[in-house]
């Protein structure tokens, strides 16, 4: 029966196509080529460091023969094959008895990528007729192999770039959430830092409790990036942000066809966090049915995807957070008591901002620096009256509300200093700012004038004459207004 090499070309093409979404096994490809084309053996060399040939794959070589081939390549004996631009035929004398047997015939075909030659594929047959029959199709195969190598090199380069970028970002996150970068030196926050330091290096389940906006996600991140799992993923999910019908799919994943609309397989957050930390925010809003499945994961450390039967091990560290009173939720039947005890291993209570007044100015300065850079502003400081307003406000939204207030002030500020009128209206109520209940034009002008005088006196260390010059007024007029507004200049003296 006549050998037709075209009959086997599709097999080689299909093999390459099947490996398009993963690393191509060049050794497996060469095995297929050797079988399909009744060859004796084959090898691929590519251009390596310093423009020297290096073996990329082999087929049909024994261990001893491979060592001899590798020695020939390392000695530079086959470097000349990197320079071929067209197929060439080689005899046993060309390849040497170390890599070729008597009466063999070999064909070397360049692996061309664009205008450059990346290497060569060398195939050996037991006789010359077989080599001549197969040689007609070898350039086509070499082109397919070269394109696969080109794609793999591009993918490998992109993968390496992404790995380097990932390492860089991981280091940035680790530095960002280092204990020394957490803002606040009040007694309440120092106790929080002590607890974070105690639990971070363990695998204990942590429950963060506190009002909305107190920084629970920030503390969860600090725990992860200072833990033994810091090089693994930190995966977040807000249990209150997803409908009951989707929360289980998000947590545990699903198989294709598990429910209407599940047109593909999907990993859940537990799988995505493998080896790392899973942060479940607003755990108090988790549906009761999902609470049962979460309890099983915590007890058995395993779960199944929706619609699946495969049991998956869960190697994760769990951190949860809530602003709800879980004890009341248990009494109402809204939260499982057994799950509560599983989560309540190490609890950290985050104090509201009104209980850590001494941290307000530190946080305000931090957010000012952050948002003046973000919005391209040049703001030097916050005026004393504005600071007084911040310190007097009760901040029901806690740190998040303070951050939003500072960002707004930065946006509306048209000078280098944030004044009281730049702050949100909620901070400028009569109870907070001390203005009249009915804000008139005269009272608004007086409030602004008072803030401006106080701010100028602060910059001149209480020197009235210098302040008058800055305000382009006279010392007599300024002294009158200082007395009118009841401003104590001594507080600004250094």
Image (cartoon, rainbow, N blue to C red):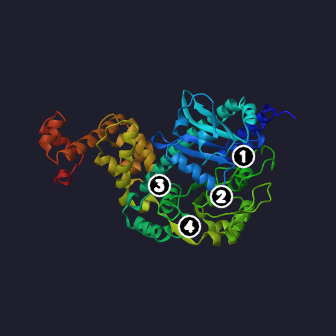
Task: Say the numbered circle drawn on residue 398.
Answer: 3
Sequence-wise, the earlier of marks 3 and 2 is 2
Structural distance between the alpha carbons of marks 4 and 1: 54 Å
> Which of the two marks, 3 or 2, is nearer to us in this view?
2
Image quadrant occupied by the N terminus: top right
Q: Secondary structure at mark 3?
A: helix
Bin the neighbour count of mark 3 within 10 Å (Cα to Cα): few under 14, some 14-19, many 20 and up: many
Structural distance between the alpha carbons of marks 3 and 4: 22 Å
Sequence-wise, the earlier of marks 3 and 4 is 4
Q: Secondary structure at mark 4?
A: strand
Structural distance between the alpha carbons of marks 4 and 2: 16 Å
Q: Position of residue 186 (x, y in %)?
A: 37, 64
For mark 4, what is the residue?
206
Sequence-wise, the earlier of marks 2 and 1 is 1
The residue drawn where x is 46% and y is 70% is 195
Task: Say the numbered circle drawn on residue 270.
Answer: 2
Sequence-wise, the earlier of marks 1 and 3 is 1
Sequence-wise, the earlier of marks 4 and 1 is 1
């Amino acid at each position: 029966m006549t050998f037709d090499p075209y009959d086997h070309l599709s097999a080689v093409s299909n093999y390459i196509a099947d490996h398009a979404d993963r690393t191509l096994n060049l050794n497996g490809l060469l095995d297929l080529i050797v079988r399909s084309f009744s060859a004796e053996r084959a090898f691929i060399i590519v251009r390596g460091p310093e423009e020297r040939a290096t073996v990329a794959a082999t087929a049909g070589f024994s261990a001893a023969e491979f060592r001899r081939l590798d020695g020939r390549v390392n000695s530079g004996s086959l470097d000349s094959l990197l320079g071929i631009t067209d197929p060439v035929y080689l005899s046993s004398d060309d390849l040497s008895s170390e890599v070729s047997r008597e009466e063999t015939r070999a064909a070397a075909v360049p692996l061309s990528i664009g205008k450059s030659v990346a290497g060569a594929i060398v195939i050996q047959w037991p006789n010359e007729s077989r080599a001549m029959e197969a040689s007609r199709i070898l350039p086509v195969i070499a082109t397919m192999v070269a394109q696969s190598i080109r794609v793999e090199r591009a993918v490998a380069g992109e993968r390496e770039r992404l790995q380097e970028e990932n390492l860089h970002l991981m280091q940035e996150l680790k530095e960002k959430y280092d204990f020394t970068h957490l803002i606040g030196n009040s007694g309440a926050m120092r106790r929080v830092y002590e607890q974070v330091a105690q639990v971070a290096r363990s695998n204990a389940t942590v429950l963060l409790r506190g009002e909305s906006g107190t920084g629970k996600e920030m503390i969860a991140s600090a725990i992860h990036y200072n833990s033994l799992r810091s090089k693994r993923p930190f995966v977040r999910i807000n249990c209150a942000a997803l409908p009951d019908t989707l929360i289980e799919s998000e947590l545990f994943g699903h198989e294709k066809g598990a429910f209407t609309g599940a047109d593909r397989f999907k990993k859940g957050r537990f799988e995505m966090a493998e080896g790392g930390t899973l942060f479940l925010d607003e755990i108090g809003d988790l549906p009761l049915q999902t609470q049962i499945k979460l309890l099983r994961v915590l007890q058995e450390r395993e779960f199944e995807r929706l619609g699946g039967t495969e049991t998956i091990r869960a190697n994760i560290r769990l951190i949860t957070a809530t602003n709800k009173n879980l004890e009341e939720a248990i009494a109402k039947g809204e939260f499982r008591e057994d799950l509560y005890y599983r989560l309540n291993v190490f609890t950290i209570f985050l104090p509201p901002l009104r209980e850590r007044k001494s941290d307000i100015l530190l946080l305000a300065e931090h957010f000012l620096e952050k948002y003046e850079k973000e919005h391209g502003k040049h703001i030097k400081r916050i005026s004393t009256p504005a600071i007084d307003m911040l310190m007097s406000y009760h901040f029901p939204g806690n740190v998040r509300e303070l951050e939003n207030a500072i960002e707004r002030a930065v946006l509306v500020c048209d000078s280098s200093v944030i004044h009281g009128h730049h702050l949100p209206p909620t901070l400028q109520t009569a109870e907070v700012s001390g203005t009249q209940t009915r804000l008139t034009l005269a009272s608004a002008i007086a409030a602004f004038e008072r803030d401006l005088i106080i701010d100028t006196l602060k910059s001149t260390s209480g020197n009235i004459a210098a302040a008058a010059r800055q305000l382009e007024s006279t010392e007599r007029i300024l002294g009158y207004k200082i007395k009118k507004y009841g401003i104590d200049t001594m507080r600004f003296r250094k």
